Amino acid sequence: MAIALLAQYAGAQTTYLNDTFSDNNWQNQNLPSSAEWFQSFNNLSTVEVSTGNYALQNAPTSATVRQGVAYFTSSTAPATLNSTGEILNVSFDLTPTSGTPQSNINGLRFMLADSGSARITEQNSNPNLTLNGAYGFFINPTVQRVRVYNRTSESGSLLTSLGDQWGNALGDDTPADTFAMSQGTTYQVSIQFERLSNGDVSITYTTSDGNSSVSSTIVDSVYKNYSFDTFAFAWNNGFGDGTIDNVMISTAIPEVSGSSLILGSIALGLLALSRRSKR
């Protein structure tokens, strides 16, 4: 009994998606190893980037933003930050493949959202949905400047514009040390959400080129979205063709410190002694 209770103090992690596209199939929903990705207009495909290694390619055909959307939980059981210290981690590899991305604050876009009951169910559809809540990230790939927006329940296009649906600006930051993305280089991108003790959500966006990394942290003290089941990305031909690979989405409960574990053990011991004395 004591061992079982002590185990609750240890950190726990749940992996919702770990899509490496190794099955060479971007339309196979088999969580957590594979998600079905919904394209906006014949823009997605899997490509072999090296021997035996596949990735998801986004190929815009015009200035219109082309998107990919995936659902990593059921609509009734989203990944949720239930208590202080819980973290949602999203990471993926991003590689520009057809040219050096242009300088554009809207050139690169990502979104984490709670879909509620409204989901895309068909390929090549314009993803106009009503969401329970979402965070949108709009990045300039030449300086890693990131704008973070919140969206509540307004319906409209997910990532095609900075219109009314993305009107709730949370922050706008360019890291002090930065770099420009270039063709053929793979960048590790991560987005971390942490629920703070006062209920705020700390959001950290990080990009690494393998040698150095830059991060921007913005705190949402107003809208406070805690639940997520949707990941989306988008860019236009200003970014060019590019691939996304190794998409990992997970939640974690931080480990309790060693002193807390000792105190917990003592408390459990006293509880056991108390029960014995009452027999």
Image (tube, rainbow, N blue to C red):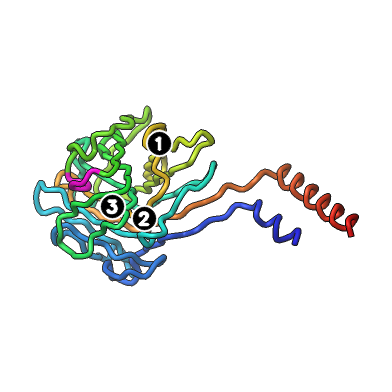
Tell me the amino acid under the disc marked 3.
Answer: Ala
- Element type at mark 1: strand
Instruction: From this view, report whether residue 194 is shown above or below residue 249.
Output: above
Q: Is residue 161 rendered magenta in the image?
A: no
Tell which of 21 and 170 is nearer to you: 170
Look at discs 1 and 2 and give the one toward the viewer.
Answer: 2
149 lies left or right of 191: left
Q: Which residues are magenta?
A: 154-160
Instruction: From this view, report whether residue 272 is shown above or below residue 141.
Output: below
Locate residue 38, reporting x and y percent.
Answer: 23, 61
Look at discs 2 and 3 and give the one toward the viewer.
Answer: 2
CA distance for labels 1 and 2: 24 Å
Q: Is residue 156 rendered magenta in the image?
A: yes
250 lies left or right of 272: left
Name the residue beneath numbered marker 3: 232
- Element type at mark 3: strand
Residue that appears at 83% across and 50% down = 270
Locate residue 192, reporting x and y percent.
Answer: 43, 44
Locate residue 194, reporting x and y percent.
Answer: 47, 42
Crowd class of label 1 (few under 14; some 14 to 19; many from 20; radius 10 Å): many
Q: Number of labelled discs?
A: 3
- Element type at mark 2: loop
Tell which of 177 and 249 is nearer to you: 249
Name the residue beneath numbered marker 1: 215
Q: Is residue 31 visible in this depiction of the protein?
A: yes
Tell me the amino acid under the disc marked 2.
Answer: Asp
Name the residue beneath numbered marker 2: 229
Locate residue 151, reporting x and y percent.
Answer: 28, 41
The label shown at residue 129 is: none
Look at discs 3 and 1 and give the one toward the viewer.
Answer: 3
Instruction: From this view, report whether residue 272 is shown above or below residue 224.
Output: below
Crowd class of label 3 (few under 14; some 14 to 19; many from 20; radius 10 Å): many
